[in-house]
Amino acid sequence: MNSGDGFLPGQRLRARGAASNRAGRFESAQRDAYDDGWDLPEDERLIATEVRLERPRSAITYNRSPDLPFDRSINPYRGCEHGCIYCYARPSHAFLNLSPGLDFETRLIARPGIAAVLDAELRRPAYKVQPIAIGTNTDPYQPVEREHGLMREILAVMARFHHPVWITTRGTTIERDIDLIAPLAAQGLASVSISVTTLDETVARKMEPRAPTPKRRLQIIRRLADAGIPVRIQVSPLIPALTDHELEAVMQAGRDAGAQAANTIPLRLPLEVSALFRDWLATSFPDRAARVMGRVRDLHGGRDYDPEFGKRMTGQGLWAELIHRRADLARNRLGLAEGLPKLRCDLFRPPPRAGDQLSLF
């Protein structure tokens, strides 16, 4: 039997987003499991999460995208165990000769020592401070953070340098770090975006199999807000004909939990994500798969995805205009239109190291 899904004999899935492990776009060959009848029978075994370690040579990644509100970010992990099927970061695993499918959520890479590298980068004489975004590629508070603690080490560096930081997550482990984030927020140096795509727990479990439930994410917002941390609810991605009808309700739930701002970005399916999402949709929601993909193509000029700057994050056409009009009306009605306070950059100071000569003034 040759299924073409890239699984080995005896492997099975539980609570995973992708249902295939096809090679990425840089691989020269596609490897498929094939049963010729000669192997001894094997017991079925779940595909476990594997974490490899990488020694980081740099911590800060810079970008020049006109679509993004930040020009630098940090990624303590590569891959994400949450397994969100729509994740636009999946294609980045292809650069590691790993599959953007199942490998992305089961073969993770942690980067211990990244906080020390960050400390050195922030001390460079040429460094110019601007807010650093964390969690814009893969989630820094995914389950493996509980063991590795890389995000906590990074935040400790941010606190010592009085450096502004913007965190995006859906992971509960962020609550562990309230003691670090709240003092930064009190100085105007930190804000958090919590992603909530739907309030329907059945849809969420299929779509984001190892992420916290929607109800639990709203609790995260409440606990951060109660600690004085500015929070945005990020209704992203908004999936047409599947979750778009919930836009106003999710914003309302976020506001009720303590969010000060709200944002939404329509679904985008770059590179390998398109086929993975279509396969998932056909299996999970076959009754509406054609309608969802038809609406997605309406948003992206007739294609599954349009990567052009100025369009990729917003979509285009009638449906895009309606989504953003609805979002504006909801924000205004709920008092979420002002956004989060701008993070301060004027407090940045590299702390003295042991043996440094202190200034006389």
Image (cartoon, grey):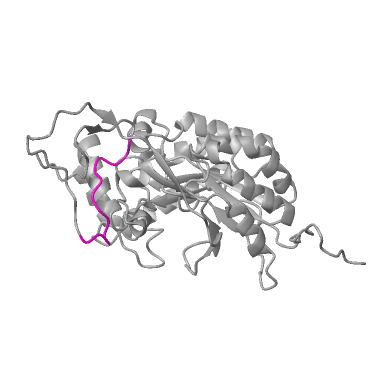
Image mark count: 0
Relative to 125, 332 lies left or right = left
Considering every residue shown, the one lying at the far right of the view is: 360
Image-quadrant location for residue 181: top right
Specify whether residue 209 is in view: yes
Residue 310, percent across and down?
41, 66
Q: Which residues are magenta?
A: 16-28
Depth check, front residue: 246 or 122:
122
Depth check, front residue: 6 or 84:
6
Relative to 300, 144 lies left or right = right
Specify whether residue 285 is in view: no
Image-quadrant location for residue 298: bottom left
Considering every residue shown, the one lying at the far bottom of the view is: 126
Residue drawn at (57%, 54%) of the image:
114
Residue drawn at (7%, 39%) of the image:
36
The image shows residue 136, relative to residue 260, as above or below, that is below
Residue 84, percent across and down?
37, 42
Residue drawn at (34%, 55%) of the image:
91
The image shows residue 340, relative to residue 62, as above or below, that is above
Considering every residue shown, the one lying at the far left of the view is: 37
Magenta residues, dominant SS class: loop
Is residue 62 on the magenta stretch? no
Instruction: Name the image quarter holding the N terminus.
Output: top left
Residue 227, percent across and down?
69, 36
Instruction: Name the image quarter holding the C terminus.
Output: bottom right
Residue 156, percent across and down?
68, 48
